[in-house]
Amino acid sequence: MNIYVGNLSYKMTDEGLGKLFAEFGSVSESKVVTDRETRRSKGFGFVEMPNQEEGEEAIKQLDGKEIDGRNIKVNVAKPKEDKPRRKQRY
């Protein structure tokens, strides 16, 4: 189950995000999305939990919870839509 986590503190790391969800079960991957150029967190990330029931429990328990001073938003990740690529300007 792929889980979206929004409104994260900019201090949150991949490891910290994984530990947060590990309280509810097995985490196969956790990733805080960062800006390519600045490498600064964009304030959201994704967690992959192989067990559906554990993932649903994590969503239920963590959605709206205050973590590092911010109320995080947690839900099932939607599939990435194919967006038309912007033309590069030279």
Image (tube, grey):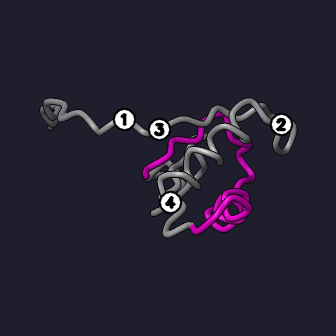
| Element class at badge 4 | loop
Q: Is residue 51 above or below residue 89?
A: below
Q: How many marks?
A: 4
**Mark 2 vs 4, N-terminal side:** 4
Question: Residue 6 sits in which quadrant?
Answer: top right
Q: Is residue 16 above or below residue 1?
A: below
**Mark 2 vs 3, N-terminal side:** 2
**x and y, in percent, of residue 2 in the image:** 43, 50
Q: Amino acid at mark 4?
A: Met
Q: Is residue 13 magenta?
A: yes
In the picture of the structure, the residue carrying the numbered disc 2 is 66
**Mark 1 vs 4, N-terminal side:** 4
Q: Is residue 23 above or below residue 7?
A: below
Residue range highlighted in magenta: 1-26
Which mark identifies residue 49? 4
**x and y, in percent, of residue 36 in the image:** 43, 53
| Element class at badge 1 | loop
Which mark identifies residue 22? none
Determine crowd level at label 3: few under 14, some 14-19, many 20+ residues with C-alpha closer than 10 A: some
In the picture of the structure, the residue carrying the numbered disc 3 is 76
In this view, the mark in front (1 or 4): 4
Q: CA distance from mark 3 to mark 4?
A: 11 Å
Which mark identifies residue 78? 1
Q: Is residue 10 magenta?
A: yes
